[in-house]
């Protein structure tokens, strides 16, 4: 590709309103442009990267035995009524009507549509197991879209769904997907961690998230220094939110106790709560939509866990997410029989966040449960990690090996054993070996394809721009001819090298603009092309060019005829 015939779109200045480095660099490197909140156009450079990510995902899914399909983005409401999610999904689900006043949704996920396909296409156990996937556009009306394509409203997801007549068979495919995800994120050159995730309101037996480690990540994950143990500290997100969280949050806010005016009031009330609460369930509720994060505490008193969970189902406490004492202790690595570190965690969060505290609620609901909640700004969420680190480092890991560390993660994948939840609701059944009708066990497996592009940049950049791993670089090599428009010799060598590299199968960007060398270098460093060949008059006397790798500052003088073999 010649730069003069390309839409490079690089920007010198940092765009306003781009908070995280990946968003800034995606705009500056000319990868995306904002259309409206959470909606982006992928420009040529961005699209090239996106397609490379897609391709790696596609290859590994196919290698793991999954079949590619493509489902519609617009889905009929009656399928969602059948599954029960028409009522349950909440405001992230965008609903629309056609000219006949029939209702539809823009698909945030595809369990319903795939169930409709499988119940019609598959009738016998002999056709199973089956794993179907697509790479497709999703829409979620995120309450606060942010960080560019990291949390957008329209985004590209790879979603796969598997169907089985036994749990053992589901577990096998689940493991195959776990392994495929490990290969995908390794090929993408990402530093990642699979972590134990909450099965949340959807129920089910087993769930893992795959997190790219980055300080800008919205999740905190606890992991062992000496084993593969890792868990999402929040243990708080369900695959599909099943409660109208916004309304419930508003309800909590309405009930805010007026005599709590300062952070000191809050802390002292909170302390009382802690004292009373050896049996307390402490709840770290992450707002499902991003921010502000709600941290909440529910005092169990004499009530059982089941009673509190029942209250949640009624919607009274639906923004809160529940974890058992053991789950919390496992997550923070506290010793058995003590909630001390968890209490401490919440205490320190409250204290340190005074400066950014924007809102809080406390009180009791009709059922007599006390609750407590704080809305944090983003910085507070970061403080929380440091606090957790103070609390848990040195503590042994729940797995028995090593100690616990806390890191920030970006959720790029999520795999889930759903069991028969959807098959029961939507009657997805086959005749089994004994000729009886049986509802199918189901697994679902998501990857945030577009989010990966941003996550990769969070991990691979410096102050000059992006440093693409080979696998996802928009171009592999760039040719920078110095003052080509004045030197016939430079032009000739550059053109020849361009043809040779293309013939050898390289994706090459040939910067044929009439620009100053400084501008050309800056642009290529910003875009992050892994290999650069600089062609200048002086080196040509020795029939040489200069080579630099984007991830090194070393300049290597190289004979022209060695370039292609060196890059191979
Ligand atoms: P999050 O916790 O970040 O809101 P999620 O748990 O709601 O994500 P899933 O339902 O598990 O998301 O969807 C599968 C994958 O889709 C996620 O692991 C993530 O990588 C990606 N994803 C989800 N929401 C978004 C979004 N708004 N923008 C970009 N990617 C997203
Ligand atoms: Mg999540
Ligand atoms: Mg998830
Ligand atoms: Mg979400």
Image: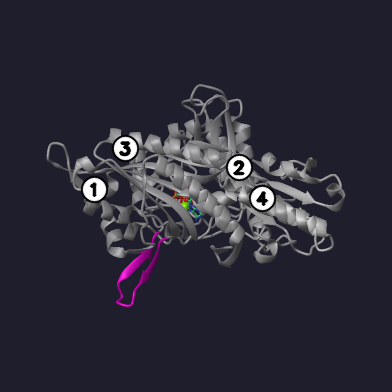
Marker disc for residue 236: none
Q: Earlier in the sequence, mark 3 or mark 4?
A: 3
Name the mark nearer the viewer: 2 or 3. Answer: 3
Q: Say if disc 3 is inside 8 Å of ligand 1.
A: no
Residue bearing mark 2: 384
Q: CA distance from mark 4 to mark 2?
A: 54 Å
Residue bearing mark 3: 170
Q: Secondary structure at mark 1?
A: helix
Q: Say if disc 1 is inside 8 Å of ligand 1.
A: no
Name the mark nearer the viewer: 3 or 4. Answer: 4
Q: Earlier in the sequence, mark 1 or mark 3?
A: 3
For residue 393, above or below residue 203: above
Q: Earlier in the sequence, mark 4 or mark 2?
A: 2
Q: Secondary structure at mark 4?
A: helix
Residue bearing mark 1: 424
Q: CA distance from mark 2 to mark 3?
A: 37 Å
Magenta-tinted stretch: 93-107
Q: Relative to residue 459, is residue 532 drawn left or right?
A: right
């Amino acid at each position: 590709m010649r730069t003069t015939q390309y839409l490079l779109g690089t920007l010198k200045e940092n765009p306003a309103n781009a908070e995280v480095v990946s968003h800034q660099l995606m705009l500056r490197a000319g990868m995306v442009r904002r259309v409206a909140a959470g909606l982006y156009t992928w420009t040529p450079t961005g699209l090239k990267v996106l397609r490379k990510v897609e391709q790696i995902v596609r290859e590994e899914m196919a290698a793991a035995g999954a079949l590619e399909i493509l489902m519609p983005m617009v889905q009929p409401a009656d399928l969602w009524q059948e599954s029960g999610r028409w009522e349950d999904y909440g405001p992230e689900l965008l609903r629309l009507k056609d000219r006949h006043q029939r209702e539809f949704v823009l698909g945030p996920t595809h369990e319903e549509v795939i169930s409709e396909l499988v119940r019609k296409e598959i009738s016998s156990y002999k056709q199973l197991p089956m794993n179907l996937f697509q790479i497709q556009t999703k829409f979620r009306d995120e309450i606060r879209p942010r960080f560019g394509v990291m949390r957008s409203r329209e985004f590209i997801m790879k979603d796969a769904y598997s169907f089985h007549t036994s749990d053992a068979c589901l577990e096998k495919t689940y493991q195959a997907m776990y392994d495929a995800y490990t290969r995908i994120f390794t090929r993408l050159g990402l530093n990642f961690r699979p972590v134990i995730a909450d099965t949340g309101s959807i129920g089910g037996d087993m769930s893992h998230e795959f997190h790219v480690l980055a300080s800008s990540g919205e999740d905190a994950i606890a992991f062992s220094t000496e084993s593969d143990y890792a868990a999402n500290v929040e243990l708080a997100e369900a695959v599909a939110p099943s409660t109208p969280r916004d309304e419930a949050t508003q309800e909590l806010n309405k009930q805010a106790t007026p005599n709590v005016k300062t952070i000191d009031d809050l802390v002292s009330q909170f302390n009382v709560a802690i004292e009373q609460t050896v049996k307390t369930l402490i709840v770290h509720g992450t707002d499902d939509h991003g921010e502000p994060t709600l941290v909440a505490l529910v005092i169990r008193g004499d009530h059982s866990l089941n009673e509190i969970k029942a209250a949640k189902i009624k919607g009274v406490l639906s923004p809160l997410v529940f974890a058992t004492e053991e789950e919390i202790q496992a997550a923070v690595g506290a010793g058995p029989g003590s909630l001390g570190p968890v209490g401490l965690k919440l205490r320190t969060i409250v204290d340190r966040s005074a400066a950014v505290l924007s809102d809080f609620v406390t009180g009791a609901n009709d059922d007599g449960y006390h609750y407590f909640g704080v809305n944090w700004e983003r910085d507070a969420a970061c403080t929380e990690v440091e606090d957790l680190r103070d609390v848990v480092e040195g503590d042994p890991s729940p797995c028995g090996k090593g100690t616990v560390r806390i890191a920030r993660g970006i959720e790029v994948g999520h795999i889930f054993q759903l069991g028969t939840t959807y098959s029961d609701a939507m009657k997805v059944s086959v005749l089994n070996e004994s000729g009886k009708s049986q509802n199918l066990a189901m697994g679902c497996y998501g990857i945030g394809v577009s989010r990966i592009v941003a996550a990769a940049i969070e991990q691979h950049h410096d102050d000059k721009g992006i440093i693409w791993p080979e696998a996802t670089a928009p171009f592999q090599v760039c040719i920078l001819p110095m003052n080509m428009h004045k030197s016939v010799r430079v032009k000739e060598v550059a053109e020849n090298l361009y043809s040779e590299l293309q013939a050898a199968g390289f994706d090459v960007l040939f910067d044929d603009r009439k620009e100053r060398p400084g501008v050309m270098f800056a642009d290529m460093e910003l875009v992050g092309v892994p290999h650069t060949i600089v062609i200048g008059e002086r080196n040509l006397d020795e029939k040489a060019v200069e080579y630099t790798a984007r991830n090194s500052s070393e300049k290597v003088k190289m004979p022209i005829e060695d370039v292609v073999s060196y890059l191979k």
